[in-house]
Amino acid sequence: METMSEIAERGYSVPEVLVSTVWVQQNLENPDVRIVESNEDPLLYSMAHIPSAVEIDWTRDLNDPLTRDYLDRDRFESLMSRCGISNDTIVVFYGDKNNWWATYAAWVFHLFGHTNIRIMDGGRKKWTDEGRPTTTERASPESSTYKAPIRDDKEFRAFRDQVLKHVAEKGKMIDVRSPAEYSGERTHMPEYPNEGALRGGHIPGAKSVPWAKAVAEDGTFKDAAQLKELYETGAGLDASDDVIVYCRIGERSSHTWFALRYLLGYPNVRNYDGSWTEWGNLVGAPIEK
């Protein structure tokens, strides 16, 4: 059974950003902590979830309904109030798919300056595999007061034109999709529908490091030495690099963004959320196969 001391022993740059299932169970009633479940599968939360955990749905809650963008400041403040999150609340994220969507939600929180976050190592699967308590009762915390700044897309987010410039300058990029997507054999993940990309391949210069290589068999993150072997020895990254990560819509790459920024301490890493659904359709954008 994983403990906080074992997480600390893995050699991460910011070990406290990961919390164990043990820690979460011990803090279920902590008023300074809000647990958030965020999944790809919208049915999972209603089937069973951690007691006191609120749900943040990546499509309904985090995305603008009319433009391909994220919610604005007013909607973020309303979401935080509904979830009982104040400006100084420690927000612990977890979810399915080994925390794809948990890290995605955490990344969106960063755009509004809420960096007091944690990821429950191992996600939803580890919690249930260990037989920890769950409930079907939807959490309804007391509303909070939250004041957010205007969303800041500069530090953590990359846009199309910035990626074009990055390519021209031969900047470091990581493509976290499957090898078949990277090679152009497929334009989408196996078992998933084609989401409209007209071309297959990858952004010129990007190195292929599928997101799941950062995860151990039990869904927890690999230790720092293994992550350095993966990203530095294997893909040529250095902590001083300006790095852009991408996938198809930014969800898998948020997982890699988290690993690079917090577990390895890379100060300059951005998530290109337009990713392949934008780049694969972009007129004039170069690709490689």
Image (spheres, helix red, strand yellow):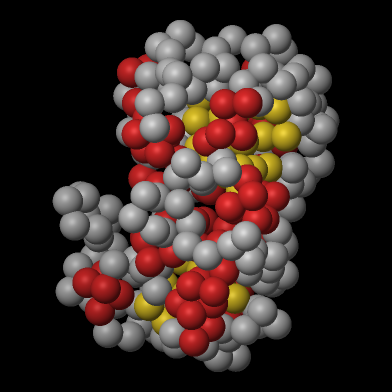
Q: Residue at x 45, y 45 (%)?
A: 122
Residue 248 lies in what quarter of the image? bottom left
Q: Is residue 86 above or below residue 135?
A: below
Q: Does residue 197 appear in the picture of this structure?
A: yes
Residue 273: percent from left, percent from top: 50, 58
Q: Total label count?
A: 0
Q: Is residue 255 left or right of residue 86?
A: left
Q: Residue at x 56, y 34 (%)?
A: 22
In this view, the residue in front, 175 or 197, is 175
In this view, the residue in front, 276 or 13, is 13
Residue 128: percent from left, percent from top: 37, 30
Q: Is residue 93 above or below residue 203?
A: above
Residue 5: percent from left, percent from top: 64, 49
Q: Quadrant of the C terminus?
A: bottom left
Q: Is residue 285 above or below residue 8?
A: below
Q: Residue at x 34, y 34 (%)?
A: 129
Q: Does residue 247 appear in the picture of this structure?
A: no
Q: Is residue 34 above or below residue 202?
A: above
Residue 154: percent from left, percent from top: 72, 62
Q: Residue at x 25, y 60 (%)?
A: 188
Q: Is residue 188 left or right of residue 252?
A: left
In this view, the residue in front, 68 or 135, is 135
